[in-house]
Amino acid sequence: MNKQKTFRRIVTGHDADGKAIILSDTSPERTYMIGGPDGAKFHEVWSTLQSPALIDSNSGQPEEAGLVLAPPKGGTRIRVIDFPPEGENIRNLTKEEAAGHFESMGGANASNASQQHPLMHRTQTVDYGIVLEGALTLILDRVETTITAGDIIIQRGTNHAWANRSGEYCRVAFILIDGQFTNELL
């Protein structure tokens, strides 16, 4: 089981006089295990419904029914994922089982299992990934690279998967921005 420590999510806002205040200081309220008790843990930190994001005094995070892979159309999302060491249960997923994982996140169309990895996927987003702890392998169609704490990935709508081959947990913060493919990439 994941022994990762929790982290704080501090949300600011404004009081009735327009002065800056802290609205909440807790761990993210919405967390989801994908792939069972030994799978990745998603911490949904925040999302916005549009860009530019509306800023008001004290509204909370938009409601969502469950884990959603992509950000809202025209919006953004920040999440932290704790990736456990990858085992045979992931490496041996069938195409249908892999598609089921993405479907459970509202991303059935993202799944693109391949010889490189069963969890290959592609979304119409620009994602900034910041490795906070550990090491993770980024797998693309023609190349892979291992990223470690402090590394930053700019993921631009490419077909990819993540594999934790390190033997230790890896924590990555992802900022997802809704995007649109140009005709050449459709």
Image (cartoon, rainbow, N blue to C red):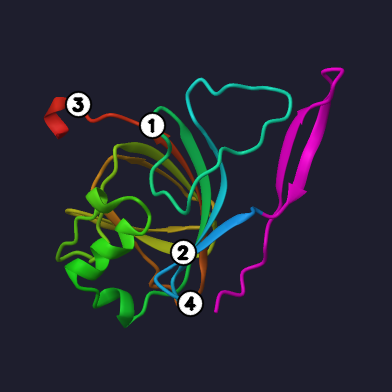
Q: Mark 1 points at which residue?
A: 73
Q: Residues within 10 Å of mark 2 (few under 14, many from 20)?
A: many
Number of the label disc, if any, that sits on residue 134: none
Rendered view: 142 above or below 116: above
SS at circle 3: loop
Q: From mark 2 to mark 1, how far is it between C-alphas?
A: 31 Å
Q: Residues within 10 Å of mark 3 (few under 14, many from 20)?
A: few
Residues at discs 2 and 1 in contact (Cβ within 8 Å): no
Viewer-proximal residue among 162 and 118: 118
Judged left or right of residue 134, residue 125 is left
Which residues fall within the magenta stretch?
A: 1-27
Residue 25, given in percent of the width and then of the height, sits at: 77, 47
Amino acid type of the residue that numbered disc 1 sits on in the rendered structure: Lys
Q: Quadrant of the N terminus?
A: bottom right
Judged left or right of residue 57, residue 70 is left
Residue 160, given in percent of the width and then of the height, sits at: 27, 53
Number of the label disc, if any, that sits on residue 37: 4
Judged left or right of residue 16, residue 3 is left
Going from N to C along the chain, the mark reached first, 2 or 3, is 2
SS at circle 4: loop
Amino acid type of the residue that numbered disc 4 sits on in the rendered structure: Pro
Number of the label disc, if any, that sits on residue 182: 3
Residue 132, given in percent of the width and then of the height, sits at: 56, 55
Question: Which quadrant of the structure image shows residue 56?
Answer: top right
Seen at 26% across and 66% down, the residue is 98
Q: Name the residue under label 2.
A: 135
Q: From mark 1 to mark 3, how far is it between C-alphas?
A: 16 Å
Going from N to C along the chain, the mark reached first, 1 or 3, is 1
